[in-house]
Image (tube, coloured by chain):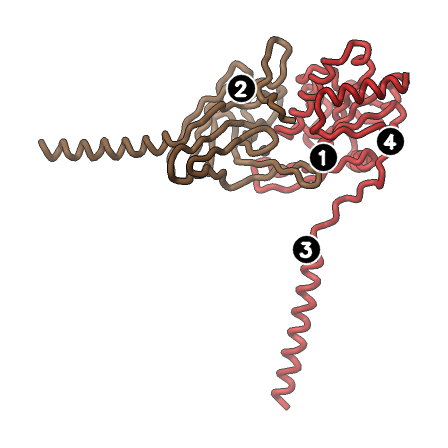
Chain colours: A red, B brown
Amino acid sequence: MKTNKTLLLGGVAVIALIAAVQIWSGLNQQPEQTALAEKPTGAPFTLQSKEGEVSLSDLEDNQLALIFFGYTWCPDICPMSMVFLSRALENLPGDVRDRVQPIFISVDPDRDTPERLQAYVEFFDAGILGVTGDKDYLQQLASEYGAFYRKVEMDSAMEYAVDHTSDFYLATNKGELITTLSHNVSGNQLNETLTKALAEIQ
Amino acid sequence: MKKHLQLASWLLLLVASFQLQAMDIQVKNPHVRAVPPGSQVTAAFMELHNHGSEKRALVDASSPVSAAVELHTHTEVDGVMQMRRVSQIELPAGGVARLEPGGLHLMLIDLHSGLNTDTQVEITLTLDDGSLIELNLPVKRVHGHQGGHQQDSHQHH
Ligand SMILES: [Cu+2]
């Protein structure tokens, strides 16, 4: 009888253990990446720059916005993308160039104040607007463009990094996403896409 | 006297072998990315050629210009760029490790001051055998109108 009780207790313990392990591994499953909108369509937005509020609707009807989501502590991908962008824009004929407004949206408002952003974008000398805003607003906006980012704690003097997609989004002043350009795009491809899209809205 | 000579030659040999070891690693095109004023971080790039017959690893780095220098890598997972710290960078025997934009890099964190393109940045690399490599890296602006020549323009995008 005594043995039976021990067996029973043992059995209960084993079952409890299995259950615990299952729950634990369930909790530890990789969270699904923030679901991207099925087909991102873009969205209008108003964000803060050093000079004040910036809205997509500030652009003329015959202008397009070339949008990039990043953060200034990004040592590599973001500056590389900005350099690439400014060089590609330099190669456009002046009248076409004037109709493209590059916008750098910082998704790290904790570190990137509008002042800091201003110094950052000026460095690239391409008339880039540096803007940021409220965290929830940014998260929502990014998903509407099909951009993804997340803060990741790091065992580092940086404390955290921001994982992020690094594409360019071409949008109208109404916030309609025309196309997404991979960061692997060539300067020629970018120019072709811009020229074509601009011709269509002329 | 003879004994002294012997000792001296032994010492010489010892020193020579240490130097040889350090010389097995050749550093090519080291440079630091110029960053906008006020930036707290930047990255350093280079090629590390291991001409020796033993594998080595880069395990640490330091610099007087920043509070920390870390070994980092970038990987792209489903279109998402992820920067992570790595504990070491392998230098295979007869091989090369490339620290280049979009991939492995030295991350300079908490810069004490802005880095101008006319400054040189001292960086000391520590290898897994304890040997040190002292470097003076130019700061290169990857973009500039004033005849600036883009340094990492090679296909990097
Ligand atoms: Cu890094």
In this figure, which residue is indicated by the disc labeled 1?
A: A165
Which mark is in front, 4 or 1? 1
Q: Residue at x 66, y 78 (%)?
A: A11
Residue B11 % position (x, y): 22, 33
As displayed, is residue A120 above or below residue A144? above
* Mark closest to the chain's N terminus, 4 or 3: 3
State the separation of the CA atoms marked 4 and 1.
18 Å
In this figure, which residue is indicated by the disc labeled 3?
A: A28
Residue B18 % position (x, y): 31, 34
As displayed, is residue B87 above or below residue B135? below
In this figure, which residue is indicated by the disc labeled 4?
A: A43
Q: Quadrant of residue A134?
A: top right
Q: Do circles 2 and 1 both sit on a common chain? A: no
Q: Residue at x 85, y 21 (%)?
A: A197
State the separation of the CA atoms marked 2 and 3.
43 Å
Left or right: A202, with B94 as reference point: right
* Label 4: element kind: loop
Instruction: Name the chain under label 1.
Output: A
Question: Outermost residue toward the bottom?
Answer: A1
In this figure, which residue is indicated by the disc labeled 2?
A: B139
Quadrant in the picture for the N terminus of chain B: top left
